[in-house]
Structures are given as structure tokens and as C-alpha cells.
Amino acid sequence: MGLVSSSLSSVYLQLLALNTTDELTKPITMSDSEDYEYEYDESDQDDGGDQNDNDEFEYTDDDEGNAEEGEVALENAYYNAKGMRDAGEYQEAAETFESVVKMEVAGNKKKAGVDDDEGDDDDAMDVSDHGGMKPPLKYHGTWGYKAIKQLVKLHLRSVDGAKVMKDYHRMLRVASSPDAAISPNAVEKGVNGMLERVSSLINSNSASPNPSVEGGPNDPCVLARNVYDTTLRVFHPSTGISPNERLWFKTNLKYGQLLYEMNETAKLQIVIRDLLQSSGQSVDFLEGSGNGSGIETMGSSGNSGGTHVMEIAALQIQLYSRLKDTKKLRQVFQRAMSVRGGIPHPRTLALIQELGGKMHMSQRNFVEASQSFFQAFKSYDEAGDRARLRCLKYLVMASMLDASSINPFDSHEARAHRDDPEIVAMTNLVQAFHNDDIREFERILRKNEGRLMDDEFVREHVGDLLRTIRTQVIMRSIGPYTRIRLTRIAKDLNDIPVDDVESLLVYLILDGKLEGRINQVNGVLVKSSQPLEKSDASYDNTNKLATGSIQSRNIASIMQLTSALENLTTAISKTGSQGSIEQVRVM
């Protein structure tokens, strides 16, 4: 009984609370219960109310339902086509993608009250020759744009140049249409994807070229140029049907990089000219003809200006590096390094520094080369680019050529990569170099010949590396002696020919690193007991070489001839100046 009373009391308290809440929230004009009953009755009545209103309500619901059904049908057809593509049914997939475009256009025309049979220049199926740029296409939407993009990919897979250009041109016209409502990000992503695909075609064709398509519309190089040219025309800031300065600039940069890889330097120069002009600079701006403060002014006016200049400079440095134009390369590198205010991609900075390091190496400025390679390594590392390992190799090589006692792997940035399979060979080389272990050094070179010699730049400087470590071994071997046989030196250098030993000694004597003379008759190096004064170095080196080999005597003769010519030039200059003074006195 007590339990029942307790339950009743609880129910009573809950009802009381509900009534209190209703009183507090009750509207003045109508009770909540009445309003609730009215809404319930209105929505649930089978009959009643105005019949016309019911008809109108049902018509609107059907219209929205049809629109949703149309979207679902387009989506299903699109993904069915992708499934066919993934299954290798490329022809069926292409036909289904084309049907998606037609379905969407027909639906959009119906909404716009346009007869589907009406054909005009803006019709969806107007995909005629791409030679002339036509205006944006009407009556397209998102699904049609996606379907056309997939068609372009299918044609790229089969390398059908004519179909690629036809549908790529249609894709750009749809992307440019306000009716399609394609977001700028989607347009840029789609265009960049297509540009990357045509660029990859060139790389694959380089690996396995097909002479039968060379120069034709299916030639990957020709197709890539056509795709880039069409893209640049569509998005040109002044004359394009869909002006987009940012996308145009980025596309031109990619086009320039592609032309560099294709070794088309003449067209690359035209692209660089267009990029400089679009940035408001003169054509020879980066070559030093412009005002040096202009770079700082431009960079300080906005990050985009300085960034654009750095990106163009990276392209121009590659051009002059390919042309072996060291003078212009140095000018562009110095101008690029003076840019202030830009925030280029780390990969752009790395490329500039890497090519700058190669320039310093060609001029045998090994200290500057080491600094540039180290900066390039750090920038590549920041960008997460595997090219950092290549620059680390170059850094190690420059450090050894400079005969530096500093190990590049002592820095914490480089230490993390010292055990990488691509770097282990260079790590061991550095260790052998600092230990003056010529036998181990040459053994490592032979063992890793493929890995090291595949890099053309490393291959060019292997001879210099060998000469550098051999000269170090020579200086260590002859240190305690005043006379030493050349055969003994050759043995210390891992049994190289005596003629090579003689060439190395001549180099050391002429460079002022060794004081002595070579007695070729006896095959002996005789070191001088007294160090030479710098002012007498040229004369004494000539005398020391006079008793040496034929090569040594030839060098001595050239040095004597040079000295005689310098004395003659000085005498003529003095005579000419005295004659001029006499003429002035007479006048």
C-alpha cells in the first residue's frame, strides 16, 4: 500500500510540474494544445481545405523530386562510367561519360525553357576544331564538367592527340561558363592535373620513344605544346575568354620548365620574356641592365612581386646553365639573391642555390660553392624533396675539393642523412679523404662507380677529387725528406704511373705549395732548403723546372717568354709616355 501511494504521489508531482510549465509558456491568443491540434489536423487531413492549394503543393513537390532524381541519375551514370574505366572497358566508359554530358545539358535546357532541338554555337555538343577559341559553353553543370575531364584523361591514356584537344578545349569552355558554376579552385586543380599528365607523357616517351608518331598530332611533345598553348590563350589576363592572371602565370612557369626539359631554349626565352613583362619588368631586368634597387623596391611593394621575380630567375638560371653562358648566369644569380620581400617556394630557392653552386664550382670557388650547396640542401629538405641528397653529395664534393678539414656531416642537418643508402658512399669517401687513405678512397670509387658516376656533375669532378687527395698524400709523404724518389711517391699513391706523379709535382711547384725541383734523369724530387720569397717565386720556379722533363722545360720557356713580353710592354709604355711629354713641351 505504501508503495502504491508513493507511485501516485510521484505521478501527481510530474503532472503538476507539466501544468505549471504550460501556464508559463502559454501564448496569449491561443493555447498550445489548440495550436498543436491545428497543425496536426492540417497536415493529416485527407480532405478539406482548398483543392487548388493542394494541387499547387503537390506540383512543387513533384518538381523538386524530379530535380533530385535527375541529380541522382547523373551521379549514378558518372560513377558507372568510372567503374567501366577501372575495369578496362574504355570505349563503353567514354560513351557513358558522353551520355552524362548530354543528359545534364538536356535537363538544364528544359529548366531554361529552351527546346532541346535548337542548335546554336553555344550548344553543349559544339566541339568543333580547336583552332579558333570560341566563347564559353552554356547549359553545362558540375557533372558534365567532370565527365568531360574524364574523357580527356581517357584520350591521354591512348595518346589520341585530336580527341584530347577537342575535349580539352570543350572542358576549358565549360570551366569558363558562368552557367556551369565551376569553382576557381576546381578549375585550377583540373587544369594543373591535365598539364601534369601531358608532361608525364613526354617523360615516358623519352624512356621508350616511338618514331612513327614523331612530329604528328600524337607526338607527346606536340600534344604538350598544344595543351599549354590552348590553356594560355583561355586564361590570358587580357585576351582570354576566362582571364585568370594567377593561373596564366603558373601555367607559363610550368610551360617554361617543360621547354627546358625538352631543350627548346628559343621558345623558353620567349616564355621568360612574357613572364617578365607580365610582372612589369624589362626583358633584361634580371641580367643586370635594370636598376639594382628596383628589385628591393618591387619586393617591398608586395610579396607576390618578389616571389614572381624569384620564380622567373630560377627559370632563367636554368636556361643560361644549359647554354653554358657563365657571365649571364652569374648576373641572374646575383640579382636573384638580392631580391627582398618575396616568399618563394623552398624548391625555387633550392634550385637557384644549386645552380649557383655549380657555377661557383666551374670557377673553382669551392668555398662559395659549399655555401650554396648547403643552402640548397636545407631548402630541398624543407620542401621534402629527395633532391636534397643530390645537393648533399655536391656539398661533400665541394668540401673535399676545397681540402677543408671540416666534415660536412658534422652539421645536424646533414648528420640525419649520413646513413642513407645514396649517401653512404660519400660518407665513406669523406672519411678516407680526411685520413689521407688513397687506397680506400679509390676502392670506394670503384665499388660505387655506378651510383656515383651516373651523376654527370659528379663525374666531371672525380678527376679533381683524385688530384686533390693525391696532392695531400704527396705533401704528407715528402714531409720529412729533402730528396725522395718519384717511384716511392708513386707507390704511396697506390702505384700510379711516374708520369702522373711528375705532373702532380709540377702542379704543386707552380702553385707555390712545394719548394723544390725535379731531376728527371735520376727520377728524384729535390726539395729546397730555404723557402722562397713571394716576389722571387716566378723566377725560382722557372730555374727549378729547367732541369726537369720536357713538359717542365716547356712550362719554364712559356713563363720566360711571358716575363719578356711584360718587360717589353713596360718599356714601350714608358717610351710612349716620354714622347707625349716631349710633344707637350714643344707645343
Image: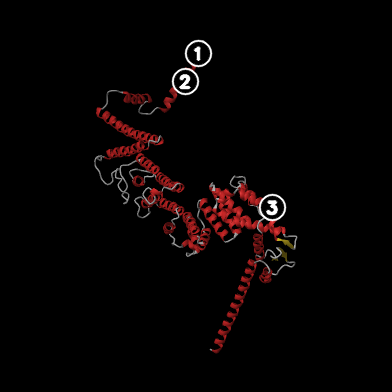
Which mark is first along the chain, 3 or 2? 2
Vertical placement of 519 versus 572: above or below?
above
Relative to 271, is 545 on the left or the right?
A: right
Relative to 522, is 75 on the left or the right?
A: left
Amino acid under label 1?
Ser
Where does the image place residue 478, in percent across and percent down from the top left?
72, 60
Q: Secondary structure at mark 3?
A: loop
Query: Mark 3 highlights which residue?
Result: 435
Vertical placement of 198 versus 33: above or below?
below
Which mark is first along the chain, 3 or 1? 1
Residue 172 visible in this rendered orientation of the protein: no
Q: Are marks 2 and 1 in contact (CB under 8 Å)?
A: no
Query: Mark 2 highlights which residue?
Result: 14
Which mark is first along the chain, 1 or 2? 1
Q: Are marks 1 and 3 in contact (CB under 8 Å)?
A: no
Where does the image place residue 310, in percent across and percent down from the top left?
49, 56
Vertical placement of 402 versus 85: above or below?
below
Mark 2, other Cα within 10 Å: few <14 / some 14–19 / many ≥20: few
Mark 3, other Cα within 10 Å: few <14 / some 14–19 / many ≥20: few
Pick whichever, 459 or 412, lies toward us. 459
Query: Mark 1 highlights which residue?
Result: 5
Amino acid under label 3?
Asn
Question: Label 2 to label 3, Cα distance in Å?
Answer: 93 Å
Where does the image place residue 330, in percent across and percent down from the top left?
53, 61
Pick whichever, 456 or 53, lies toward us. 456
Amino acid under label 2?
Gln
Examine the image and state in which quarter residue 79 appears.
top left
